[in-house]
Amino acid sequence: MSEKGILLVVSGFAGTGKGTVVKALMEAHPAYMLSVSMTTRAPREGEQEGVSYFFTTREEFEKTIAEGGLIEHASYVGNYYGTPRAFVEKQLAQGRNVILEIEIQGAKQVKEQYPDAVLVFITPPTARELERRLRGRGTETEDVIRKRLSRAAEEASRMEEYDYIVVNDVVETCAAQIHEIVQASRRKASACGELCSRIAEELQCYAQK
Amino acid sequence: MSEKGILLVVSGFAGTGKGTVVKALMEAHPAYMLSVSMTTRAPREGEQEGVSYFFTTREEFEKTIAEGGLIEHASYVGNYYGTPRAFVEKQLAQGRNVILEIEIQGAKQVKEQYPDAVLVFITPPTARELERRLRGRGTETEDVIRKRLSRAAEEASRMEEYDYIVVNDVVETCAAQIHEIVQASRRKASACGELCSRIAEELQCYAQK
């Protein structure tokens, strides 16, 4: 793995099945891995340090923010969650494609710092299908389902701020489309500056011989 | 083929083997076709109207330019060559990916009129390899080879104006990379406006129920 990895941001409405798509992508291609978040939340039964999360104190977390050690962060129900920069950059340097499953605010923070990051929004084929998937879980109350649909309606207005939109109809097809997008992004002229300079220099030498 | 086709511009130094790559791409995927150019040059033995070229008079050609009937055009050794708009748009509407094998000036003209067009520059892995391929033909004089390398050195300085750079090391790999790029370009948010609007509207309806 000599080529640098791609930073892949994946977002989507609750119920779209993005977790399943990401799992299929990682199963099909070992070069992908999920980022491990840092959090101030207490570990739950069975959660492992450095696998589920990097667990830390509030004080340490705030120090890490101040030092620029997080690519993005947010707080949720009184706890901090964030993406550790050093961990992500190490994986990218080793040629792994690092996946961040985050929301639009975080996605925008990532793009500002890593312009070559690839932002993908996964949508179900129709709103009806999203409702069917949410109800299909059988665990949510009517009230929760309504809130999720209403939240999705808000999120939908910002879909076009992503780089790419993929439809999750068949999971494997959707995962394959994301892989095509990541592969294509390696060939972007903006990512090939080194190659272009080398070829141009070599040709200059030949032309002057 | 319900989806609209992609307009694919392919450029590369003389000797890069772009013709071979384009042929491999069309053989692997029947949805691709080469554009047929319009020219004022006289037909040669075996050339067929509408297959090799659309043959026309100088007067007709200039009238077509004036009417905006060409996407791009250039003159070469006293003859006009151009890409007929109506032909290309009909093929795209039918879901075919239309390939234009043209140079940087034409490529820029295409991008201005079709911002969703995909501009790909094919490069050999090294300048040495380009020289080897040029000499390998065995038909060119030393003078012609030097002129081609010198021309390539000029062209190399504008490689980064393309959307994507692909290396033609193994022909089939190069063709597969171009196909990935074309497939990925279909998922660009800028190409998915209709999908995004439909999902957003549907979700609005659900949220207001």
Image (tube, coloured by chain):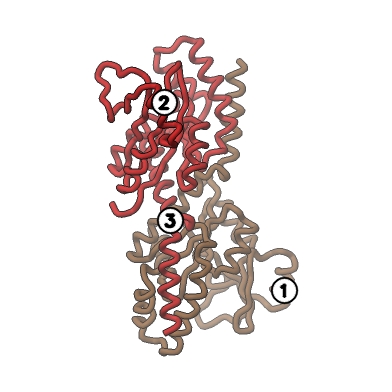
Chain colours: A brown, B red
Note whether B186 is above or below A123 in the view shown.
above
Residue drawn 45% across and 81% down? B207
Note whether B208 is above or below B136 in the view shown.
below
Q: Report whether residue B143 is seen.
A: yes
Pointer 2 or 3: first along the chain:
2
Residue drawn 50% across and 44% down? A187
Image-quadrant location for residue A80: bottom right
Q: What number of labels is visible?
A: 3
Question: In the image, what residue type sits under mark 1?
Answer: Glu
Q: Position of residue B190 (x, y in %)?
A: 48, 55
Question: In the image, what residue type sits under mark 2?
Answer: Tyr
Q: Position of residue A30 (x, y in %)?
A: 43, 56
Residue drawn 39% across and 69% down? A124
Q: Which residue is mark 2?
A: B81
Q: Which residue is mark 3?
A: B187
Q: Report whether residue B125 is seen.
A: no
Give the Cα separation between the discs numbered 2 and 1.
64 Å
- Tell me the element at label 1: helix
Q: Give the number of the disc on residue A62.
A: 1
Question: In the image, what residue type sits under mark 3?
Answer: Arg
Can marks 1 and 3 be said to lie on one chain? no
Near-viewer residue (A96 or B38):
B38
